[in-house]
Image (cartoon, coloured by chain):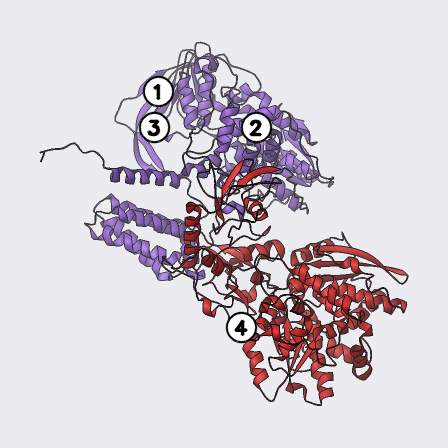
Chain colours: A purple, B red
Amino acid sequence: MNRLQIIRPSAREKTVAQLYSDLARRGSVAPHGNCPLEQSAAFLKLCASQSCGKCVPCRVGLDQAAAIMERISEGRGELKDIDTLEHLADSIRDSADCAIGSEAARSIGQCLKSFRQDFISHIEKGRCTAVFDSVPCRAACPAHVDIPGYIALVREGRYADAVRVIRYDNPFPAVCALVCEHPCELGCRRNMVDDAVNIRGIKRSAVDWAGEVPAPACGPSTGKNIAVVGGGPSGLTAAYYLQLMGHQVTVYEQRDQLGGMMRYGIPRYRLPDAYLDGDINVILSTGVKIQTGKAIDGEGYQALRDQYDAVYLAIGAHSYKGLGVDGEDAENVLSAVELLRAMGDGQKPDFTGKRVVVVGGGNVAMDCTRTAMRLGAASVKCVYRRRQVDMTALPAEVEAAIAEHCEIVTMMAPVRVEKDADGKVAALVVQPQIPGAYAQGRPKPMKADKDEERIQCDVVIAAIGQVVDSAEFAHYGLPTQRQNIQSDEGCMVFQSEGVFAGGDCASGPSTVIRAVEAGKTAAANIDAYLGFHNVLPQTVDIPPAHSAVTGPCGRVELPEREPQARKEDFELTELNMTHQECSQECSRCLRCDHYGFGVFRGGRNTKW
Amino acid sequence: MVNLTIDGKAISVPEGTTILEAANRLGIHIPTLCYLKEINEIAACRVCVVEVEGNEKLNAACNTAVEEGMVVHTSTPRVLNARRTNVQLILSQHNVSCTTCVRAGNCSLQSVAHELNLLDEPFEKKPFPFRWDKNAPLIRDASKCIQCLRCVNVCDKVQSLKVWSFNGTGRLSQVEVRDGTPFREINCSLCGQCITHCPVGALSARDDTQIALDAIADPDKITVVQVAPAVRAAWGDAVGLDARLATEKRMVSAIRSLGVDYVFDTDFSADLTIMEEGSELLERLKTRTDDKPMFTSCCPGWVRFLKLEYPDMVPQLSSAKSPQQMFGAVAKSYYAQLLGVEPEKIFCVSIMPCSAKKYECAVPQVSDAAARDVDVVLTTRELGRLLRGVDVASLPEEEFDQPLGTASGAGVIFGATGGVMEAALRSAYFLVTGKNPDADAFSDLRSLKGWREYTFRLGDADLKVAVASGLGNARKLCEALRAGEVQYDFVEIMACPGGCAGGGGQPICDGQELAGERGERLYTLDKANLLRFSHENPSIQALYRDYLDHPLSEKAHHLLHTDQAAWDL
């Protein structure tokens, strides 16, 4: 017998560990439609299985809590069970000896809080009203694009048909092929096997290889006229679908070019003009009337309401928040919106040899950081008051910035901007932070017991958020809340007959695909508001699913141009897959439209 | 064409063919359970799985398209293990009570389990509980449901009513009445298509055989049976008799063998319906030009559908009662008088290819000659159950009783889609022109197409008519009428695809759609009948001469017409 031994994990332990990692992967794509009680009862059972068994609350309590939840989910519960469960959860949380019990109890409390109604309806109706998300990628896509459908088409080499299928739900296939945040991939059932299908990458292939794909023919004219204020993704999406439905749309755009934040927010190295203009030209080909360089003020808004049968406000969020620190009036302090807007019109500031500091941790901060590097800056630092892991920017964007020699400076909060004698920026003074208690899912930064630091620089760019410029409209009676225009889930503006609003101006700053969702929703509801029920035809036939499902297989990532070269110009950094890569990636699609629930319901309900 | 090999046999089939269809062509049997061609190809039961070389997992034969060079094996050890296990799992949720089950001997689960030689049930039994109003015409026993979802898809895709839905997720998911609504409140037409497409005994029509047996045994009752047209085309399937032996006349003696007093023919009252409905049509064409078309009203599934889904169109229904109800009314008035008995002494048993008829006969507003003109409705399947133990093959052929047993060929084709229209046009032509058309002049109407339209010359005017069967087609037709896309004078609609021949009360031959075949038998009977016109039926002529006076007379109105708008649902 050794006095001490080296412990190596047994096969049993390795397998259990593997089960937990499988669980994490499955958990990441948990079907949202499934019965929440069933799922939480199962989770509690798992928690109970982790208990050591020493203490009463955890050993007995978790098991009892799971039993109550299961009873309710089976339709055998009583209303008083909810109270019992609540007291039980409080008691376990408060009296369990360690985290195994108390953290599980916290989850019970969270369930009771967030889906109490489901508990009640299970008890009162004795049944579950859960509806399974048959095609998870499609359910997760805000525009509900038929993803398995177009992947099947790409696999067959029918790229133009793939673009047609995408456009049925989203008129920005090229833009989204490059910049979509692809929430679809988070839902991809393939995560259960290995990793999500590279859906956006496949879309890129479809778009790059399809050539020009004309818009479908518009329906017969309805004689209705609709004004769209704002030529961004949401406004143009609404315009496109309304035109196809036979209405006449006029888009009012305050800037010289269409595109909104796609042109005046997203840098060219991520979204070249050719892609953006390609999508926009197809939209315009449906006969949309355009008035660029035409800002709509409050009076103009009133006039539009009188003049048109309906108005869709999609003005975006083009105002910005200031740093709110001393010295921000210094010369060379600018906002992300100002920088990116100028870039959109081709006015490039010269940062040659300058030391640039970008403040913020979102995607816009990354866009500014990488843009500054391309404008010739000697150095670019992105200063953020939280940890890198807390950044809201996509990890890939942060990594790309680092690869391009940008620096990420975390746990530093701006205190003041120091000016030189000429009133120009000399430095950004920052206060080191410490991650504190959690608030809204991430730790709130707090002042650390460290001295202020001074970051010498020539330019400060504030990328800490955008707001909606809605004051003019609010003045004319449009309801707003924190400057966002208030509209319902159908994009209808409260107490404003015939006025709809959506996209960033209603939701606050968000993504292109969310703006598309709003535009599409608005189009459908404007059509209905005008007394129509124009259902657009989906005419592309989708190839049948292959009999073979590809087993575990690596996901192909899109290659990027070499950092040293790409940081010198504004050419597109991301490259397309090869045909071999694309074909393999397409074969990884599990065809949830055919395999599983999709073949019964929801697999191919293409009409909206 | 796609080339593949199944169990070593090569075959070339069109693109898009499933493995199942390709195997069938080769005569290779692959068992199925949830599969219903074009209606339910959802691969849920996983019984039809096969092994495709090169594929890691087994494939469902029912909805996997063939691929070039595919090599398929339909009964490897892996396949058999999966099939056997899946059927055992299905059995764990199934209340296996075969001896007392309405589908004993005609159950797809039973035959698949038998085929797979399953001799035990290794899994814990967990059937859902049976909770249902046993007085409803349609009964669902959740403890027998195998969640194959055929009923959900038949009601949705074919009948467009979506009465059934698949609720919940995971282990607790199951078929329910849509949104958990109580059955009596749901918009069910009671057509019974879910019953005839259920592979097991989960869905059935209420069994009323004991009511009939009690009446037969009651010495104070005169039991009068009427047999619907479509029953004679299918009753052989219910008693296991070959079609050549299952003749109309042998059916008469089989029913007589049950001890009933009289066996009459609903074809007789179908002829009567033609007289009333045909006259009503001609009158409406003259007087009511603003609410065209007139709809036939023979089918209670259709009447319920219209009342539930398009109540504003109910006034367009012919006010004529269905042949079943006309028969009951005549039996308990005219015939009671002929027998010299009180109507209450007569017990009217009707044998129907239909489950909705059980509802119709109980509608309080439909009976005029007695409290209940028709006392009990038995389906063709119930007739088969009553005849168990009777050696029907050895029975002689016998005639219907008289006078309510005489019918024309026009009456017998009521049981096929388009038949009511054809019969009506034969007599309408006579009423308008004063002479008979060729009896087969309207044979273009004989088709299984779900919705079809025709224009016929009647005297000096064109009559625009349409025929639809299946409620999904009925809905399309109603929508087109409402949108003004079509205009007709007269429309025949039957709730079941193919008409009563494919009715929800007919014998179940799982996986086969027999409406066409059964309908053909009716057309053969029509052809063989010396009487081809309802108005030439001597019993009908006598009925009018001696009792009713003339079509649409006051007495006829009282006994033979109804206000469907007033019917309880």
Q: Reading the chain from its start, which is encountered first: label 3 or label 1? A: 3
The residue that label 3 is drawn on is A387
Residue A171, visible in the rendered structure: no
Circles 4 and 1 on the same chain? no
Name the disc covering residue B135, or none. 4
Looking at the image, is A39 positioned above or below residue B560? above
Instruction: Determine whether label 3 and label 1 are within 8 Å by CB.
Output: no
Eye-nearest disc, 1 or 2: 2
Corner quadrant of residue B401: bottom right
User: Badge 3: few (under 14), some or many (20 or more) residues near its Cα, within 10 Å?
Assistant: some
Disc 4 to disc 1, how far (Cα)?
83 Å
| Quadrant including the C terminus of chain B | bottom right
Query: Image point 69% across, 83% down: which residue?
Result: B332
What is the three-letter code of the residue carrying label 2?
A: Ala
Disc 2 to disc 3, how far (Cα)?
37 Å
The percent position of residue A239, horizontal first and vertical second, equals 64, 35
| Residue farthest toward the top in the current orientation of the protein | A353
Disc 4 to disc 2, how far (Cα)?
59 Å
User: Badge 2: few (under 14), some or many (20 or more) residues near its Cα, within 10 Å?
Assistant: many
Looking at the image, is A185 positioned above or below residue B194? above
Could you tell me which chain the residue with mark 1 belongs to?
Answer: A
Circles 2 and 3 on the same chain? yes
Q: Is mark 3 on a helix, strand or loop?
A: loop
The residue that label 2 is drawn on is A206
What is the three-letter code of the residue carrying label 4?
A: Asn
